[in-house]
Amino acid sequence: MKLNSEAVVRYRDERLQKVKPATVRRELAILRHCIEIAMREWSLPITINPAHRIRLPRADNARDRRLNETEYRRLMAVLDSSSRWYMKPIVTIALETGMRRGEILSLEAKNVNLVDGIAYLPLTKNGRSRRVPLTPKAIETLKPLLYRLRLFPISAPSVRQGWLDITRRAALIDFRLHDCRHEAISRFFEMGLSVPEVALISGHRSLAMLHRYTHLRPENVARKLKSLSK
């Protein structure tokens, strides 16, 4: 098969049938970079990178799903009765800190400082470390788990299956575990934290990405305006 724009377009369109546009965009970026390296350092006999000449799919994967109070109570009730001991602390930490699933599963006792209220993440999704401030509820949740070297010796598939079971029993429609991160970040703003403070917690390095995770409730803003006007 020739390495040309038509081949890259076929790859793009085939992948769009299987994965989200944002995933295809990342894969094409990797492909584009690999071809650039091959052209510049390995003398690939082409003059124009074919991955540069195609249209990228729009990555419109933004979500605004949040928990209402009734859903939150149902979720907590099901977590309280779950036989999977790890699900309630994982979900609680996600809602209290905005950590991703992988970050929570990677937590080690040596990196959790309950005195200062900090959880240290040596490696995050963006390739950088992060120190996450902990809420009192997060500290309370982590405290009984610190006897383990790794706080959650659980696989990602086990958590995924546990979450599917929890949401089914709690009758939560279209609420993903990752949506807990959206919920947490939105709550931080509703609590009155500033943009730099929330970015410090979440690890977002751009305002645009932070905005994608922020979904304030208009009624909460209205109540805040009412209190400020008194």
Image (cartoon, rainbow, N blue to C red):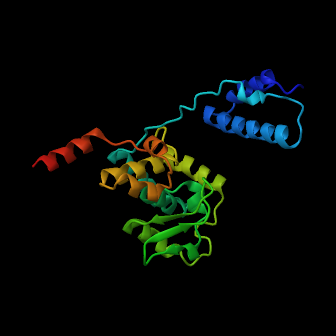
Q: Residue furthest top?
A: 6
Measured as percent of width and height from the top left, residue 167 is found at 50, 46
Q: How many marks?
A: 0
**In front: 196, or 114?**
196
**In front: 205, or 36?**
36
Q: Is residue 136 visible?
A: yes
* Quarter of the figure with the N terminus: top right
Measured as percent of width and height from the top left, residue 204 is found at 50, 51
Q: Is residue 81 visible?
A: no
Rendered position, 107 above or below 177: below
Measured as percent of width and height from the top left, residue 200 is found at 45, 58
Measured as percent of width and height from the top left, residue 216 is found at 34, 43
Residue at 57% from the left image edge and 55% from the top image edge: 101
**In front: 179, or 162?**
179
Rendered position, 106 above or below 39: below
Residue at 50% from the left image edge and 55% from the top image edge: 203
Horizontal relation, residue 72 to residue 120: left or right: left
**In front: 153, or 122?**
122
Horizontal relation, residue 115 to residue 108: left or right: left
Quadrant of the rendered image containing residue 123: bottom right
Q: Residue furthest left?
A: 230
Horizontal relation, residue 20 to residue 196: left or right: right
